[in-house]
Image (cartoon, rainbow, N blue to C red):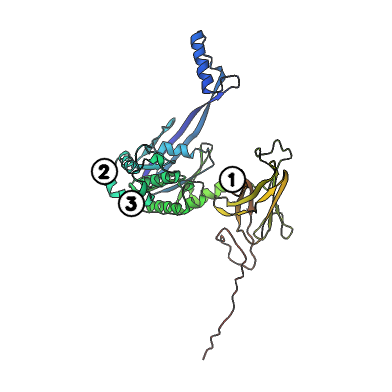
Amino acid sequence: MSVIVAENISKKYVIDHQRKNGPSSLRDIVADKVGKLFSGKKDDASFAEKEDFWALKDVNFRIDQGDRIGIVGHNGAGKSTLLKILSRITEPTTGQIKIQGRIASLLEVGTGFHPELTGRENIYLNGAILGMAKREIRESFDAIVDFAGVEKFLDTPVKRYSSGMYVRLGFAIAAHLNPEILIVDEVLAVGDTEFQKKCLGKMRDVSESGRTLIFVSHNLTAIQALCNKSFYFEKGLLIDQGDTTHIVTNYLSKVSHKVLEKHWDDIEKAPGNDQVRIKSFKLFPEYVDNLSHIDVRTPINFQFQFWNLEEGANLNLSMHLYTFTGECIFNVGTPSEQLAKGLVTGTCEIPGHFLNDGSYVVSMMIVKDTSTIVYNMEEALVFDIEDYRENVTWYGKWPGYIRPQLNFSIRQTEHIVND
């Protein structure tokens, strides 16, 4: 049975572009309007241009009861707009959506909370919004508080909660008040590792109980672990839908673009700020057997250069390596050094026989006094590692993110002698 049916869903927003010769601030706009009112001049809106932006365009799908739907796509692809339509926060511009069942949504930190009310009061408020009786809320109350871990602050107004407390309580309410459809947007982006594991476990429990789950996340590993079907959105269009493994593979093949080098020769145009400017970030593979691609045997060298513009600054580099699904493999840093003004070079080597095959992303931070991030160059380099095997007759996917050659041996330690 289909619990959600979307038919030709589109959502349009109107964007105002202000021209350079028009008022540039709210004060200027108000002064301009008032001046024209008293002078008798007609309001001239020529300084503003309007543009239609379609966040979603002609989207069609069906979601059956018990489906676990993952939604993938770049930022701005239309994922959050779709969830707001499904949650009845906004209406589509065209098309219609049919929903059977009670929906609970966790779209962003603080959604559905009244900041002046306490955690206790917000639990009852959210339950009432879901259409639950006070008895039903009371039956789930202790489980919600225990899951969120906010018992000490239960009678504190939620406006004093940290973002982590907000999202823990919000997720606990959404997951425990027994909705037929649970919608979750990037809950794994906030909170510590322990809470993320609890969220994944709870969402798995929800899905296994026959309820419907719709899950948006940049963590593709979590989507693959939780969801049996997925949607791939791009620029407001539903590009593909179907089995999660197929969708994730298709998505990665379209977004994976190797970037092995970035450099800037002009310091004035280089990225950075008044403390540092980036000159280059390069990847140098030590290709094996005269190959032109990186495989699991290939040592990889990184060279990062930047101009230090502050005399005597104590700086160090911090390099992060991520899988293409968004999980951090490791973070390694250099010692902190007191540096003069001028060009600074950092190098790092990842040995061969360390990383498994797959796609990887590298980010680099410049850190001052071992604590303050001066500049963060996110997702700077992207590279692929191909598989290579010898003396192995099994060709399934090698599990894990690393694939080290360790001192692991086997030998005969005892013989069985037949009588």
Task: Give the label, 1 or 3, closer to the camera.
Answer: 1
Circle 1 Cα neighbour tier, 10 Å, few/some/many (<14 / 14–19 / ≥20) = few
SS under mark 1: strand
The CA distance from mark 2 to mark 3 is 15 Å
Nearest the eye: 270 or 390: 270
The CA distance from mark 1 to mark 2 is 48 Å
Q: In the figure, is residue 229 to the left or right of 22?
A: left
Please give the label number shown on residue 169.
none
Circle 3 Cα neighbour tier, 10 Å, few/some/many (<14 / 14–19 / ≥20) = some
Nearest the eye: 87 or 227: 87
Residue linked to disc 2: 134
Residue 418's place in the image compared with 202, above or below, is below
Residue 74's place in the image compared with 51, above or below, is below
Q: In the figure, is residue 252 to the left or right of 66?
A: right
Q: Which residue is outermost to the bottom?
A: 419
In primary-sequence order, the first of circles 1 and 2 is 2
The CA distance from mark 1 to mark 3 is 39 Å
Residue linked to disc 3: 143
Residue 311, image x and y in percent?
70, 43
When asked about the image quadrant of residue 270, the answer is top right
In primary-sequence order, the first of circles 2 and 3 is 2
Q: Residue at x 49, y 34 (%)?
A: 57
Residue 257, image x and y in percent?
63, 46
SS under mark 2: helix
SS under mark 3: helix
Amino acid at the residue labelled 3: Ala
Nearest the eye: 31 or 352: 31
Residue linked to disc 1: 372
Amino acid at the residue labelled 1: Thr
Q: In the figure, is residue 121 to the left or right of 323?
A: left
Q: Which residue is outermost to the front?
A: 312
Residue 263, image x and y in percent?
71, 43
